[in-house]
Structures are given as C-alpha cells and as structure tokens.
Amino acid sequence: MLRCKGAPKSLCGRPGIFFFVFLVIAPRAFAQAVSPLPRIDRTGRHPALIVDGSPFLMLGAQINNSSAWPSTLPAVWITMAELGANTVEAPVYWETLEPEEGQFNFSQVDTLLDGARAHHLHLVLLWFGTWKNGSPGYAPHWIKSNPQRFPLVRKPDGEPVFSLSPFGKETLAADIRAFTALMKHIKSADPDHTVLMVQVENETGVWGSMRDNGKEANVAFAAPVPAAVLNSMGMHDSKGTWAEVFKADADEFFCAWSIARYVEAVTAAGKAVLPLPMYVNAALRDPLQPSAPLTYESGGPTYDVLALWHATAPSLDALAPDIYLPDYAKYTAVLDQYAFSWNALFIPEMGNRADYARYFSSALGHGAFGFSPFGMDATGYSSFPLGAKRLDEQTLAPFAWNYAVAGPLQRELATWLRDDRVRGVAEDPAHHTAEVKLPGSAGKPAHWQSTVSFGLPAFGMGTAAPGNKAPEGEALIVSLGPDEVLVTGRQCRVDFNPTGTASNRHRMWDIVEEGSYQGGQWVRTRLWNGDQTDYGLNFGKEAIWLRVRLQTF
Ligand code: DGJ
C-alpha cells in the first residue's frame, strides 16, 4: 500500500494522492528540471557569466555576416568543431525576421537553435536591427524605403547619412516591437537556454557625421546636459548645453547619449520579456592616439564614453570591444580600457589572423569571461586585409590550441578568472621576455613571480630570448596557492623566481606534474624532471597543463 509519508493525513485517500503528486510534488520536480537563466554575477573579483549555476568560460567564434542560413550553416558547424568552440555567435537579421511590418518569421532563429543544439553548442544571438556597423543595412525594406517615417541622420548641412536617427520615435517603436518579439520567441523556443546572451544592435554609431543634426536632435543638443550624464563623468558641478559643457567633444558625447538612450529602451523592453545577459559591441577608436572627428564611428561605446554609456544604458551587462588591432600595444591598451569593475569583459569580435590567437591569454589575464574571433566558418569568405587571407589549418591551429587547452577545464578556469587567480601573457614582438606578477594568497603578497620568454630552444640556458619568428607565444598561469601554480603555454618558456629582496633564495622545482582536470579532479599523467625542467618549463605547440609546486633553497 502506498504510504503518504510527510503528506497531510486528509490527503491520503485516492483523490488526495492525486492532488499531492500532481499539485505538490510534480511542480517542484519540474521547477528543478528547468535550467536557470544565464546571468552575470558581480560578487567576485571579476564579473562572471553564470551558466547552469556556475561560472562559464565562453570559447566563442563569430560567423560571417551572411552565414546564418540553412545553406551555409553546415560550413559553420565544420569550423566550430575544428576550433573546439563551445559557443557560436550568429546574427538575427531584422529584414528576415519581419519582412512585412508586424509579420514575424522565426525560421532563421529556429534553424540556428536546432543546429546549435545538434552540435552541442551554445549561442550568442546578434540583433542586426537599427544599427549594423552604423547603418540600417539589415532593417526591413519597409523601414529603409520610408525616410519620412523612419528618419535618417543629417549632417550639419542637412545632407542625409545612411544611418537611422536615434530620434526617430517610430523607428524606436518598430525596433522594440521586433526585438521583444524575438525575445518572446526565444523564451518559448529555448527553455534549456542554448542562447546565453544577446547582443543588442551591432556596432552602433554613425559614420560620416559626428551626430544627428536633424530638427529634434538640434533641440536636444541645445538643451542642458542631463545630470546623470554629468554625474557619470564626475562633473557634478557643471551645467549648460552640450556645446557649453563638452566643447570640442560635444557632438560625439551627444551622439553617444542619444544612441545609448535608444539602445537602453530596446534592451530594457527585451529584458522585460526574457532577462538574458545583453551587451553592445564597439567599433573602436585608436586606443593610444587622439582620433580626429569623422575618422571613427561616432556615438558607439568607445573608450572615452564608457561611463556615459553605462549611466545612460544601465540595462546592458557589458560594453564590449571588437578588436581589429593586431598591434600588441594597441590590443593590450583596449583590454586595459574595457576591463574594470562594472564592465564584464568580453571580446565578441576580433581579427581571425593567426597572430591574434595569442591574445586569448592576455584577455583571460584581464578577467574576460569570453573570447570570440570573427569570420569563423568554412564558407570560403575572407575579410582580408582586416582578417586572415584564408581560414586554412595553419590559421585555425593557434585558435584551436586555445580552446583545446581551456576546454577540458573551462568551468574551473572560469571560477579562477572570477576570483582573479589567472595571469596571462601574449608575446610582445618588441620585448622577448615578460615579467608576470602573480596574485597573492589569503591576503598575503605573492611568494613568486614568473618570467615568460619567447623564442628560446627547449634545451640550454644562458642566451637572451630572441623572440619567435612571428609573435605567436602565449602563457597562462593560475595561482592555486602560495607555492602552487597551474601553467600552460604555446611557443614559450616559463620560469619562476621568489619575490622579495633576499638574493640567496632560489627557485627549486618541488614537483612538476603533467596532467588534466577530469570531473573537477587533477589527474597526473607523468612527472617532468631532468632535461624537461632544468631549463625552465618549455612549451611548444601541444596543449599541455603542468601543475607545479615551488620551493626555495
Ligand atoms: C565588425 C562588424 O561588427 C562585423 O559584423 C563585420 O562587419 C566586421 N566588422 C568586418 O568583417
């Protein structure tokens, strides 16, 4: 006989059992089975992307703009497998989603969802809406062909620019309606959260004019700068119009405010339907040199307006740089500019030339929760000279190395990233060794610092590092405890020195284990000693992790 343990006595008759099982137990079990929404957690040292309850490291790849079609997706899945990616970033085209006003077709989204699931991948959906690289190229025909209803940005002389005005009320309403329809569809079609995040618009901003000079825009430009904008920039005591307060920067800052305000409305409406993490991507200005007006896309979340964007569009979880700057100093400067407390660092796009791959380690060293080269599919399209000439095996190999190294322990790495235990180095062609400060442990200063050298042979000491022929080296070091590290590298030598001033203390390898994390446990495959450690820890092109205990003598 069935015993109703724990159930009220009155429920122990037959109808009572029915009631208890279907109304009390079943909903609870169902609630447990539904996976929680991905979210950004800000309680650690770096913001973390939480997927299925724990930090997740996005090993991503973005496909070419016109590759999210049933005819081209097979070529996408090939490259994702070659890379070992865990997440694919793919566009959703407004023109395809809403070909006629108010009539939605979600088949493109469903094709992406089915394909990603079949290939065990997560998705980041890119909303190609009002802005795609500053233009309305992906807006439906009924928008593009009706500038009376959906106005374009105007230059100071009144000439139109191929960019929708952020003051277009009907444009905003139409974008919100389409974006919320998309989010509603994801909510019902994706209960398991294949979709981890959504990018709102694509590279917002204006090329060819520093701001909209239309009638409404000019009225707003002549009004006082909102207090929230001034406060975000620490200018609490300033007041006046945009031109009075910001002088030479007025046009750009006004443009950023007007676009951020628009994007906030779209994002907030989308999140009200389904609060997935959402971000915007940035077409960058030169991170090291001042950029002359009209030489960059004005109004997007470039480094000089990050605080303004954050204050104006608080629903966004991240302001993310698209890094098409292969130069070491510039790439690193961008990471420094976008990695700070309230911004969850994420690289949604970067060049796919082989020399970009090494920046994976620097991005992780800056606490990034995701990394995604652009143009990753086997359709044969090449964005050279911005990207690689060909996406051949040689080009893919270093990106695949990153994901082969990080994939098996992505959950552990994501947790260490959140806790600021990870340091990363990319080879700087101007300096062939890098000194790396490790984080301290339990509130105490680090016992060790590391030297990473590039271009040395695996055997022998005493020569200065010449650098690799092409700058391809990288290293990742995780501090596991005061005298224990996990280390990997590509085309480099890693060594450690005790910190402090005592010159009579030297590094001794206590133990160097090669192995892997399996089910959260470190499993040793062999020990390194003798030639393999006498000259430092030398890494070639294999994906290897070493767990190292250090001592002094
Ligand atoms: C940045 C854009 O966001 C991408 O969609 C693409 O157009 C690349 N530039 C260039 O290939």
Image (tube, helix red, strand yellow):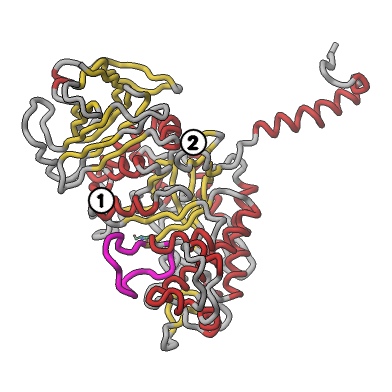
Q: If the image is split into quadrants, where does the N terminus sit?
A: top right
Amino acid identity at mark 2:
Pro
Which residue is at the front of the view, 453 or 147? 453
> Can you identify the residue that label 2 sits on?
55
The reply to whether residue 2 is in sight is yes
Say which label, 1 or 2, has the lower sequence index: 2
Amino acid identity at mark 1:
Arg
The reply to whether residue 130 is in sight is no
Q: Would you say residue 295 sits in the magenta stretch?
A: yes
Q: Residue lying at the far bottom in this picture: please name it.
A: 157
Among the 4 quarters of the image, the one containing residue 251: bottom left
Percent x, y of residue 400:
31, 39
Q: Main secondary structure of the magenta part?
A: loop
Q: Image check: 44 left or right of 388? A: right
Q: Would you say residue 233 sits in the magenta stretch?
A: no
Q: Which residues are magenta?
A: 284-301
> Can you identify the residue that label 1 sits on?
353
Percent x, y of residue 418:
45, 37
Percent x, y of residue 531:
13, 19
Residue 542's disc number: none
Which residue is at the front of the view, 552 or 154? 552
CB-based contact (under 8 Å), mark 1 and mark 2: no
Q: Residue lying at the far left in this picture: please name it.
A: 463
Q: Looking at the picture, does residue 425 appear above or below residue 131?
A: above
Q: Image check: 540 left or right of 105? A: left
